[in-house]
């Protein structure tokens, strides 16, 4: 009798306190039989652990803190804010191709006839506006541990990545098809011309994985790259640094770049000093 009591006591202690309580002869998904796990439960080939009160509170606070951090600045919030900015400035055009566009509620429309744009392959995607990361998400995401553990999907849970991904200074309105074709390709200048998108002056070299932006936005790109480099401590290659430095000098800000920077500062709380210095 004493032996039976000892066994029952040992099993009870195992179930409540230990982190190494395993069922005997378990196969996942079938009843476990008489073991640390009750007979009417299916088998979990795993350890059982009961959180103490302090651990439960800590876990709860950590989850809640993560939710708050992520909600402050993120890509979804940024897109909503950008739609408002461009609705208030309807004369502005798409970043890579200079096409007029408009919004009906949050649905976007691109005027192909006005800019001579011809879809390369995907007319449905070409007909809508997408918010392009001038510095691709991979460029700033790969500096974070979350990216190494699971790429962009894993980084969606990281508040630092959320702040980078939702930074208004790094987002521009682009024809969806061109945004998709640009992917995460480096900016460059080709030695030959392309006409993949009708009269659009931007082009992509899929084989070399490089993208040539039209001249009118090269300065904007350079000042955006320098902003992201300084703001988030992003390393740029020597070739990127040299190209961006040249574009920054060759193509000074136009009025919209200065106005947009000031509007974003009011919303986000910080300006791009590489723009504001030249706008003075």
Image: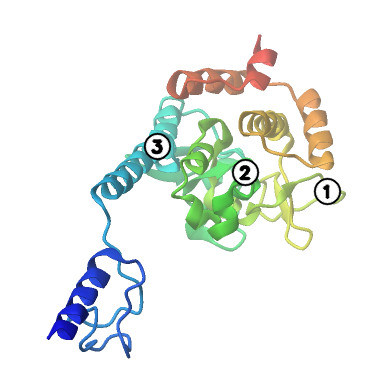
User: Is residue 162 shown left or right of residue 95?
Assistant: left
Count of labels in the image: 3
Q: Residue at x 62, y 42 (%)?
A: 97
In the rendered image, the quadrant that contains the N terminus is bottom left
User: Measured from the top left, where is residue 33 in percent x and y?
Assistant: 21, 89
Which secondary structure lies at badge 3? helix
User: Measured from the top left, where is residue 178 in percent x and y?
Assistant: 60, 51
Bin the neighbour count of mark 2 within 10 Å (Cα to Cα): few under 14, some 14-19, many 20 and up.
Answer: some
Disc 1 designates what residue? 190
User: Is residue 169 shown left or right of residue 75?
Assistant: right
Q: Residue at x 41, y 44 (%)?
A: 108
The answer, for residue 97, to whether it is visible in the render is yes
In the rendered image, the quadrant that contains the C terminus is top right
User: Measured from the top left, where is residue 167 in percent x and y?
Assistant: 52, 34
Which secondary structure lies at badge 2? helix
Disc 3 designates what residue? 69
Q: Is residue 22 above or below residue 53?
A: below
Bin the neighbour count of mark 3 within 10 Å (Cα to Cα): few under 14, some 14-19, many 20 and up.
Answer: some
């Amino acid at each position: 009798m004493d032996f039976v009591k000892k066994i029952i006591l040992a099993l009870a202690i195992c179930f409540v306190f230990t982190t190494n309580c395993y069922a005997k002869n378990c196969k996942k998904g079938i009843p476990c039989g008489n073991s640390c796990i009750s007979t009417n439960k299916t088998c979990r080939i795993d350890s059982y652990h009961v959180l103490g009160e302090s651990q439960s509170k800590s876990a709860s606070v950590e989850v809640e803190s993560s939710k708050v951090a992520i909600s402050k600045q993120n890509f979804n919030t940024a897109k909503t804010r950008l739609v408002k900015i461009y609705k208030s400035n309807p004369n502005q055009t798409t970043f890579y191709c200079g096409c007029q566009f408009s919004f009906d509620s949050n649905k976007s429309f691109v005027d192909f006839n006005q800019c001579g744009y011809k879809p390369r392959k995907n007319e449905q995607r070409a007909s809508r506006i997408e918010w392009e990361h001038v510095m691709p998400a991979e460029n700033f995401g790969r500096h974070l541990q979350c990216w190494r553990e699971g790429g962009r999907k894993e980084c969606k849970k990281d508040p630092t990545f959320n702040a980078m991904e939702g930074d208004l200074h790094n987002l521009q309105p682009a024809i969806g098809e061109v945004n998709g074709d640009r992917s995460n390709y480096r900016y460059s200048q080709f030695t030959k011309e392309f006409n993949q998108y009708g009269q659009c002056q931007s082009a992509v070299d899929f084989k070399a994985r490089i993208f040539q932006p039209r001249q009118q936005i090269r300065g904007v790109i350079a000042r955006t790259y320098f902003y992201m480099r300084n703001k988030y401590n992003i390393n740029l290659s020597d070739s990127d640094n040299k190209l961006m430095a040249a574009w920054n000098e060759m193509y000074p800000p136009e009025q919209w770049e200065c106005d947009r920077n000031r509007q974003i500062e009011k919303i986000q709380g910080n300006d791009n000093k590489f723009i504001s210095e030249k706008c003075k």
